[in-house]
Image (cartoon, helix red, strand yellow):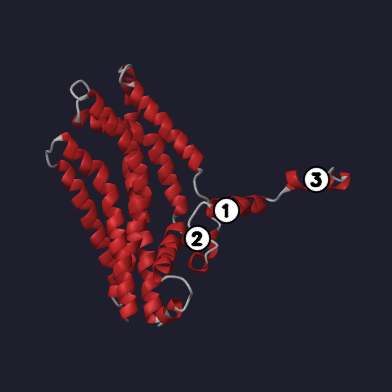
Amino acid sequence: MQEHPSDMIAEKTTTPHMKLGEILEDYNEDVDRRLPEWARRSNPIVRRHLGRYWKTLLPEPAFLLKVILVEAVIIALTLPFPVLIDLTLPAITASILLFPVALYGYAYLLLAVGSNAATSIVIETQNDTVTLLRTIPTPLTQILASKVAAALWRQVENLTILIMAISVMGLPLIISHYATIYPLVEYPIVSRVAMILSVVISLIRLILEPFMIGAIGMMAGATLPTRSSAVITTVLIGIFYFLAINMARLVPTPWPLHYIIDFVLPVVLPVLITWVGFRTTEYLLARN
C-alpha cells in the first residue's frame, strides 16, 4: 500500500527535529531491552532507588568489542612482527601516570556501590519494609539483584569512563607486564595468549567485581543494624578480597597454574561470592 503524501511530509519534518531528550530516552530503552528484567531501569525496584539517576548511558557494546578485537589483533601480530611491541613503549609512560587515577576512580566506584547496596538493606530493615518487599510477586533474589543493579546504575557513568580508559590505555601495561613474566623469546605463544586474555578479563572484572561488592554490601546490611557498621564491614571484606587475589599472583608458580590465578579466579570468585552474598542476605531477611 502506498503511503499518503501527508504521512511522508510528517515523517520528514519530525524526524530531523527530535529533541535530545527523546533520543536519549530511545537509546535508554534500547539498552534496557538487552538486559535482564531485574536489571532494567524500568524495573520498579531499580527505578525506586535510582531517582534522578535513571537517565544514564552505557558504553556502546559494539565499540568495546571492536577495541578488544583490534587489541587482540595487535598482540597476535607481535608474533611475526616483534617490532610492534617497541611501538607500544612510548605509551607506557602515559599509562603508568594514569594508572593511579584509574585505581582511585575504581576504588571510589566500589565504595559507592557497596555503600548504596548496604544502605538500601539497612533502611528496609530499620523501616520494617522487608515484609512489604516480600509481598511483591517477584522472587526475593531478583529483588535483591535489582537493588544491586540500582547501586551500579548510579555509578554507571564513572564505570563507563573507567572501561574506556582501561580498554584504550591498558594495552601497553598489559604487554609490558606479561612480557616480563613470560619472556617473549622463551614463551612466544604463552605470553601473547596471556596478553589477550588479560585484555578480555580486565573488562569483565569491571562488571563482576562491582556487582560482587554490591552483594557483599547487602549481606553486611542484612547482618548489621547500622549503616556505618555495614559499610565498614563491606570495605574490610573488599580490601581482604583484593589483597588476597593480588598477593596470590606474587607466588612463583608454573604458567598453567599462573593462568588459573590470573584468568580463572578473577572471574569465578566474584560469581561465587556474589551467589553467597545473595543467598545469605535472602536467608537473613526471610528469617527476620
Q: Amino acid at mark 2?
A: Glu
Tag 3 or tag 1, which sits nearer the N-term? 3
The label on residue 28 is 1
Tag 1 or tag 2, which sits nearer the N-term? 1
Would you call the spot at circle 1 few (<14 residues within 10 Å), some (14-19), or many (20 or more)? some
Residue sitting at the far left: 252
User: Which SS class for mark 2?
Assistant: helix
The label on residue 37 is 2
Q: Is residue 12 visible?
A: yes
Residue 203, horizontal then vertical, whole percent: 37, 43
72 and 2: which is toward the camera: 2
Q: CA distance from mark 2 to mark 1?
A: 14 Å
Whether pointer 1 and pointer 3 mark residues with C-beta atoms closer than 8 Å, the reply is: no
Quadrant into which the N terminus falls: top right
User: Which SS class for mark 3?
Assistant: helix
141 and 58: which is toward the camera: 141
Would you call the spot at circle 3 few (<14 residues within 10 Å), some (14-19), or many (20 or more)? few
Residue at 35% in and 39% down: 200
Residue sitting at the far front: 1
User: Which SS class for mark 1?
Assistant: helix
Q: Amino acid at mark 1?
A: Asn
Residue at 25% in and 66% down: 233
The label on residue 150 is none
Q: Quick check: 15 left or right of 286?
A: right
